[in-house]
Image (spheres, rainbow, N blue to C red):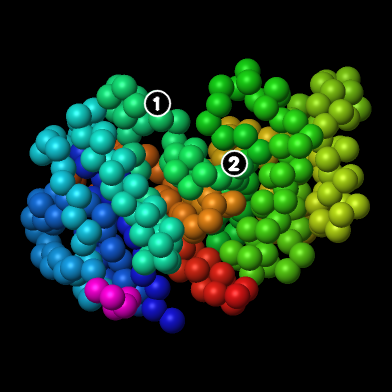
Amino acid sequence: MIKRLALTPGEPAGIGPELLVRYMENAPNHEIVAFADPELLQRHAHRLGLSLNLREIGENPKPSMRNELTIVPVKLAFKEDLGTANPDNSEYVLACLDAAIKACASKECDAIVTGPIQKSAINAAGIPFTGHTEYLAERTNTSCVVMMLATNELRVALTTTHIPLRKVADAITFCHLTRVIEILHSGLEDRFGISCPRILVCGLNPHAGESGHLGHEEEKIIIPAIKMMRASGFNVSGPLPADTIFTETHLKNADAVLAMYHDQGLPVLKSHGFGRSANITLGLPIIRTSVDHGTALDLAGKGVASVGSLQIAIQIAVQMSLNSVKQL
């Protein structure tokens, strides 16, 4: 089954547009629809010495050919200055996202794959912005979503996302944690085709609280939440200390690890699979994956940035879409 993927290249002065152009050097078995400025993509192709043919979107999905992209044009405000993110292009970056979200919500596209954006530039433009995850939740009127990064060997989901460390403990409530486990469980079943997924939960404190001697969040919130979810039929275990949960002994019995905060879980995954992993947002009414890296402004235009994460993000988006069809 041919899938049609909406792709937003992200920050125009970063590596996102050139990664898309380079990815299209090989013909995929699906259709890639770029929501971007066509002249921007042509300039990136020219810098790389590559040809790029752009075609209009049709009624039905049609596999993209080598060096060919379907384009939904969005006008760039100011020509990119490679390596320097211009806040005046922030509305363009978000307009690309909005158009792609709309196409997925209307079923015109099967999934959205997002390139890296420069959060600091968007905020410098006076637009409050914490990340793709939160933006997509707001735009789709979704009250709770789960951020998960995945390689072919490991999946790590987050209880909290882009918030300061000092606010993490207060953000982990019984209701929020149980909802996150529900979303993660459903996402693994419905989007990844895993029956009765096994979820390992990290503790928040060192040694998972050491029976209350190193913190009370485990005894007051995390353990009761896990007990309730297990009583409801979920295959969830923990809390386990974060310094040992990622050992082979535990991971061989897990389909995903649920970390309590961003820098508890993601350093482990990225140390093993950076450039070979994708960012996934679970709980949305649409499928969304993304690269696992930033805009890499210092590498923009040099043709040396790895296409690996974009390849994985597209691969996972296609598989999630196919699994979703099986559930119907």
Dot 2 falls on a residue whose secondary structure is: loop
Quadrant location of residue 185? bottom right
The numbered dot on residue 143 is: 2
Depth check: give the residue in front, 98 or 32: 98
Apparent side of residue 318 relative to residue 200 in the rendered image (left or right): left
Depth check: give the residue in front, 311 or 288: 288
Q: Is residue 38 magenta?
A: no
Query: Which residue is found at the position 68% from the left and 35% from the top?
Result: 260
Dot 1 falls on a residue whose secondary structure is: loop
Note whether residue 90 is visible: yes
Q: Quadrant of the N terminus?
A: bottom left
What secondary structure characterizes most of the magenta part? loop
Badge 1: residue crowd in 10 Å (few <14, some 14–19, many ≥20): few
First to last magenta residue range: 58-63
As drawn, 124 above or below 37: above
Apparent side of residue 206 relative to residue 183 in the rendered image (left or right): right
Mark in front: 1 vs 2 = 2
Residue under label 1, please give it: 128
Quadrant location of residue 251? bottom right
**Three-letter amino acid code of the residue under disc 2:** Ser
As drawn, 203 above or below 289: above
Query: Which residue is found at the position 64% from the left and 69% from the top?
Result: 193
Apparent side of residue 185 relative to residue 4 in the rendered image (left or right): right
Note whether residue 252 is visible: no
